[in-house]
Image (cartoon, helix red, strand yellow):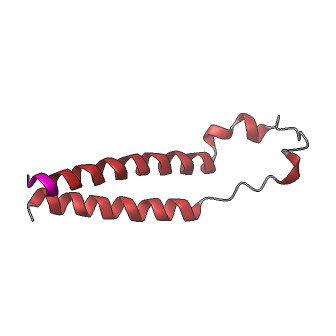
């Protein structure tokens, strides 16, 4: 294995662990029947939703998933092409 393969493998493992941890830390979407019944979502929480910890965790999860996918594809190509 080359240094590039080892580096990409380590990055892939770290991102995989980060995705698992971020996923487990997030809370569920248990809104109940209020969503179906037309419950009001016009509150301070809904207005400041992008700044909450939950939204930041979701954002970081998406970022880590995209980076994980890119690192996995580059790792596969580096092994298949023997870079």
Q: Is residue 31 left or right of residue 5?
A: right
Q: Quadrant of the N terminus?
A: bottom left
Q: Position of residue 12 (x, y in %)?
A: 30, 59
Kindly report the secondary structure that dominates the magenta region of the rendered protein.
helix
Picture layout, residue 40 above or below residue 83: above
Q: Nearer the viewer, residue 2 or 45?
A: 2
- At 91% from the left edge and 43% from the top edge, which residue is drawn? 37
User: Residue 72 versus residue 13: which sits nearer the camera?
Assistant: 72
- Residue 62: where, in percent of width, then height? 48, 47
Which quadrant would residue 11 be assigned to in this image?
bottom left
At x 84%, y 44%, the residue is 35
Residue at the image position 8 percent from the left and 52 percent from the top: 83
Residue situated furthest front in the rendering: 80
Residue 6 horizontal side relative to residue 11, left or right: left
User: At 74% across and 38% down in the image, what residue appears?
Assistant: 46
Left or right: 7 in relation to 53: left
Residue range corresponding to the magenta coloring: 79-83
Quadrant position of residue 76: bottom left
Residue 51 coordinates in the image, percent (x, y) = 62, 40
């Amino acid at each position: 294995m080359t240094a590039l393969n080892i580096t990409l493998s380590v990055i892939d493992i770290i991102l995989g662990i980060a995705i698992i941890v971020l996923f487990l830390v997030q809370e569920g979407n248990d809104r109940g029947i209020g969503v179906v019944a037309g419950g009001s979502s016009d509150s301070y929480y809904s207005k400041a939703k992008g700044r909450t910890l939950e939204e930041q965790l979701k954002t970081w999860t998406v970022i880590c998933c995209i980076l994980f996918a890119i690192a996995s594809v580059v790792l596969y190509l580096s092994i298949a092409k023997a870079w």
